[in-house]
Image (tube, rainbow, N blue to C red):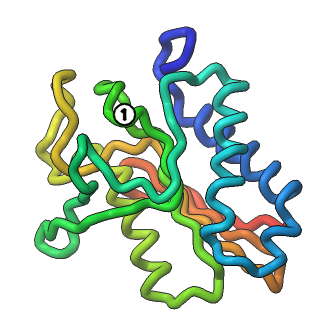
């Protein structure tokens, strides 16, 4: 929720992500170029997201890294490309209300990879953010205002974030409502 009680707009969330990303790349360039594990990037990135959310008066949301719980149970998604197979998930960075805001629990999910990662890992991460942004996990769940869905879905924005350290380029893909909506590269 934000202080004005207006719905959080997609463009506002993209703006928050892009401003946080800009600061992350400027202020953490040394960390990125030091070739540490990509997991070392999650917490600094989360801190910039938190600051941008505060600046935009978005309250009631928490930024977690490697979070894997949903109402005390392990988070799962339903893979619509593999006969609706249930898959356990842990997303690199998520912005969510931890179940407190039934109307819009999930805002942003981010998967981060180095460009040198195996292709199957990249594909898996892209698929995860696509599925997490679907409006429902099986195309039948609808918001009733009383409970969250069994499987995680309804992130307003999914981001696949791939860093090429050698070229100092970040490839970014946005996913919304289960579809890739934009992709671009930026130098850092």
Write the residue at 52% across / 90% down. 118
Q: Which percent across, then down, holds residue 90?
A: 39, 62
Write the residue at 73% across / 69% down. 170
Write the residue at 75% across / 43% down. 19
Q: Secondary structure at mark 1?
A: loop
Seen from the viewer's position, the closer of residues 111 and 84 is: 111
Q: Is residue 185 above or below residue 5?
A: below
Q: Which percent across, then down, holds residue 34?
A: 82, 78
Q: Which percent across, then down, holds residue 22?
A: 80, 51
Query: Which quarter of the image is occupied by the C terminus?
Result: bottom right
Write the residue at 49% across / 79% down. 122
Considering every residue shown, the one lying at the far front of the view is: 72
Residue 103 left/right relative to 10: left
Quick one: label 1, few (<14), some, or many (20+) residues within 10 Å? many
Q: Is residue 158 above or below residue 1?
A: below
Q: Is residue 33 above or below residue 160?
A: below
Residue 79 left/right relative to 101: left
Residue 83: name its quadrant: bottom left
Q: Is residue 155 above or below residue 81?
A: above
Considering every residue shown, the one lying at the far top of the view is: 4
Q: Which residue is mark 1?
A: 105
Seen from the viewer's position, the closer of residues 163 and 59 is: 59
Q: How many marks?
A: 1
Residue 25: name its quadrant: bottom right
Seen from the viewer's position, the closer of residues 43 and 1 is: 43
Q: Which percent across, then down, holds residue 158?
A: 48, 53
Residue 134 left/right relative to 46: left
């Amino acid at each position: 929720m934000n202080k004005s009680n207006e719905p959080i707009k997609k463009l506002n969330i993209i703006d928050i992500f892009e401003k946080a990303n800009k600061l992350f790349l400027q202020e953490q360039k040394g960390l990125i170029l030091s070739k540490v594990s990509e997991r070392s990037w999650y917490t600094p990135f989360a801190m910039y997201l938190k600051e941008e959310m505060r600046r935009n008066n978005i309250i009631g949301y928490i930024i977690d890294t490697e979070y894997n719980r949903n109402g005390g149970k392990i988070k799962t998604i339903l893979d619509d490309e593999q006969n609706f197979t249930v898959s356990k998930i842990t997303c690199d960075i998520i912005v969510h209300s931890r179940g407190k805001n039934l109307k819009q629990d999930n805002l942003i999910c981010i998967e981060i990879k180095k460009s040198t990662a195996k292709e199957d890992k990249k594909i898996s991460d892209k698929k995860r953010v696509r599925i997490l942004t679907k409006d429902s996990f099986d195309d039948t769940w609808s918001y009733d205002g009383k409970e969250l869905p069994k499987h995680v879905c309804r992130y307003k924005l999914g981001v696949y974030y791939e860093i090429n350290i050698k070229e100092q380029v970040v490839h970014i893909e946005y996913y919304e409502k289960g579809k890739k909506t934009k992709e671009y590269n930026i130098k850092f």
